[in-house]
Each structure stands twice: as C-alpha cells, then as structure tokens.
Amino acid sequence: MATRIRLQRHGKKDSAFYHVVVADGRAPRDGAFIQKLGTYNPNTNPATINIDFEQTLAWIQKGATPTDTCRAILSYKGVMMKKHLLDGVKKGAHTEEQAEAKFQKWIGDKEGKVVSKKDRLAKESSDAKVSKLKAESAVKDAKAAKIAAKNTPEAPAAAEETTTENTAENTEAPSTDETTA
C-alpha cells in the first residue's frame, strides 16, 4: 500500500480550509485516511499551518510520499529539512549534534522571516488606515470649504450694501443740516 501525505479539502465554497492527512494513494481526495497530521489555512496572510511535526517526520521516514503542495508546506515548516539532516547523520556526513544545531539555526532564521513579514504587513495596514483617514479628512475639508464658499458670498454682499447705505445717509444728513442752519 502506497501512502501519500496530501490535503483534504474542507470549508466553504470560496474559503477552502485543508487537513493534512496520510492516506492510501488509491483513496479519494476527501475519503478515508489513515491519520490526520495537521491543518492548512491559505485564507490568512501568511498562511496558517499547524502540523504535528514528530508524526509527520515519522511518516516521511517510513516512506510516505507527499504531494507537491504538501511537500512545499512541509518544507516551509522544516519537516523536509529535518529529514534531510537525519539522512545525513545515517550516511555519516555529520553528527546528530551538528544536524540539530543546523536545524535550530534554520528554524531561527525562518521564524525571523515570518515575524518580519507579519510586522511589515501590520505596518502597511496601519499606514493604509492613516492614508485613508487623511484622504477622508481632505474630502471632508473640501466639502466644508465648498459649503462655506457657497454661503459666504451672500453675507459680504449684504454687509457691503448696508455700509454703502450708511455712508450715503451720513453724507446726506450733514447736507440737510447745513441747509437748515
């Protein structure tokens, strides 16, 4: 029996969610499986991957072959790297301590990359919110200025008319006083 490590689809129509399973190669995609190894959610950024590392490594060492997508997922989580290092120990290329040190260094680098991506995405999101807020306030200010411009011309015209009437009355008043005096 050829065992495969593959994805089993779950979730809604446009938001797929996958289980990573070990199944017989002849079983249907969403059919019977031997063991569930973890989950994969591609809807988040970065994708959420939860895998039982030890069980997956044990199945890989027993000869289970992953599909192309599962191979990429397992490589991302370090299962394939660990298998490679353990195979090197079996062949005598390096010791188990050296292999563990290389693996821990690789894991540290990988976590650093993931954290930096999450930080970059959070910063971009906050920058987008700030720019959106600035754009909204600019539109609000433009509308307020337009309304103020629409209402303002009527008030100064009325004020100018009253000041011209007052000056005209003031000039007429002394002339009438001079004629009577």
Image: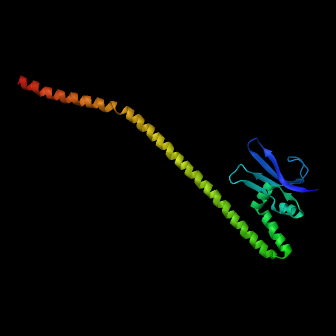
Q: Quadrant of the N terminus?
A: bottom right
Residue at position x 76%, y 41% from top? 13
Place of residue 87 in the rendered image (x, y in percent of width and height, measured from the top left): 84, 70
Q: Residue at x 81, y 61 (%)?
A: 53
Q: Residue 136 versus residue 31: which sits nearer the camera?
A: 31
Query: Residue at the right extreme?
Result: 1
Q: Which of 6 and 146 is in front in this view?
A: 6
Left or right of residue 179, residue 159 in this image: right
- Residue 93 lies left or right of residue 117; in this view the side is right
Quarter of the image for residue 108 reads bottom right
Taking 172 as reference, is 99 above or below it?
below
> Left or right: 34 with respect to 151?
right
Is residue 109 found left or right of 98 in the rendered image? Answer: left
Q: Residue sitting at 44 percent across and 41 percent down? A: 141
The location of residue 11, given as percent across then percent down, is 78, 44
- Which residue is at the far front? 68
Farthest residue, direction top: 180
- Residue 25 in the image: x percent, y percent? 90, 53
Q: How is the image coloured?
A: rainbow
Residue 138, how many percent across, how many down? 47, 43
